[in-house]
């Protein structure tokens, strides 16, 4: 059964947009980019807009600084000032096409799905390589046993 978060992710990925390549869902576009050899990366960068907003809040509430650090409004004001001093950061996700110097900012949902494409391919490659190793007779006994257990559990799941 799908959770509400899963439905939200599906709704995000199934939205239709007009791209240079044509009209398609985000999921189709991500898959196309993956097939073309694009890569994704995650970066942390300073959030200047949030810092400006916080600086404005500190300025607007400057009368809350009574001088008594135990007073709740003063505590809040001083903690916000420390937060501004430390800086506000956010995580951003980028997709870069193969052979391009530019990048496209994507959502976390799109980033996670792109990483899932990579994982699915890695698992399929490992499974294929294991079958070739077993057929060639170079797989270890442990690998063969694990593969047999996986096949048996799959069979029992659908045979009953």
Image (cartoon, grey):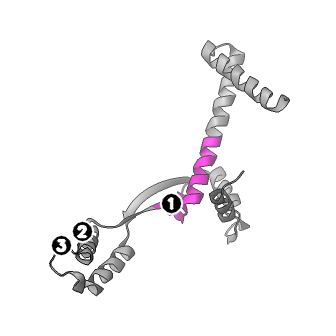
Query: Which residue position is annotated with label 1?
Result: 94
Query: Which secondary structure, mark 2?
Result: helix
Query: Which residue position is annotated with label 2?
Result: 82
Q: In this view, does 73 lie to the left or right of 95?
A: left
Q: Which residue is drawn at 63% across and 16% down?
A: 139
Front one among 121 and 109: 109
| Pointer 1 or 3: first along the chain | 3
Across and down, in percent, residue 36 comes to: 64, 53
Q: Does the magenta stretch include residue 62?
A: no
Q: Magenta stretch: give its range.
A: 92-120
Quadrant of the image occupied by residue 82:
bottom left
Q: Which residue is drawn at 42% across and 57% down?
A: 43
Identify the mark at residue 69; answer none if there is no mark: 3
| Pointer 3 or 2: first along the chain | 3
Front one among 21 and 138: 138
Query: Which secondary structure, mark 3?
Result: loop
Identify the mark at residue 113; answer none if there is no mark: none
Q: Distance between the residues labelled 1 and 2?
A: 30 Å
Quadrant of the image occupied by residue 56:
bottom left
Q: Is residue 97 visible?
A: no
Front one among 35 and 44: 44
Query: Which secondary structure, mark 1?
Result: strand
In this rendering, the answer to whether 145 lies above or below 17 is above
Crowding at mark 3 (Cα within 10 Å: few <14, some 14-19, many 20+): few
Q: Is residue 61 left or right of residue 16?
A: left
């Amino acid at each position: 059964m799908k959770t509400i978060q899963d439905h939200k992710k599906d709704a995000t990925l199934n939205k239709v947009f007009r791209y240079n390549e044509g009209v398609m869902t985000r999921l189709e576009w991500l898959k196309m980019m993956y097939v073309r050899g694009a890569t994704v990366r995650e970066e942390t960068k300073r959030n200047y807009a949030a810092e400006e907003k916080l600086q404005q809040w500190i300025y607007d509430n400057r009368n809350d600084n009574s001088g008594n650090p135990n007073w709740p409004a003063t505590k809040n004001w001083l903690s916000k000032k420390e937060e501004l001093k430390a800086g506000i950061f956010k995580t951003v996700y980028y997709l870069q096409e193969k052979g391009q110097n530019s990048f496209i900012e994507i959502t976390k949902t799109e980033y996670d799905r792109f990483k899932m494409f990579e994982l699915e391919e890695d698992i399929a490659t490992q499974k294929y390589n294991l079958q070739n190793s077993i057929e060639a007779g170079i797989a270890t006994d442990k690998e063969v046993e694990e593969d047999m257990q996986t096949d048996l559990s799959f069979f029992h799941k659908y045979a009953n």
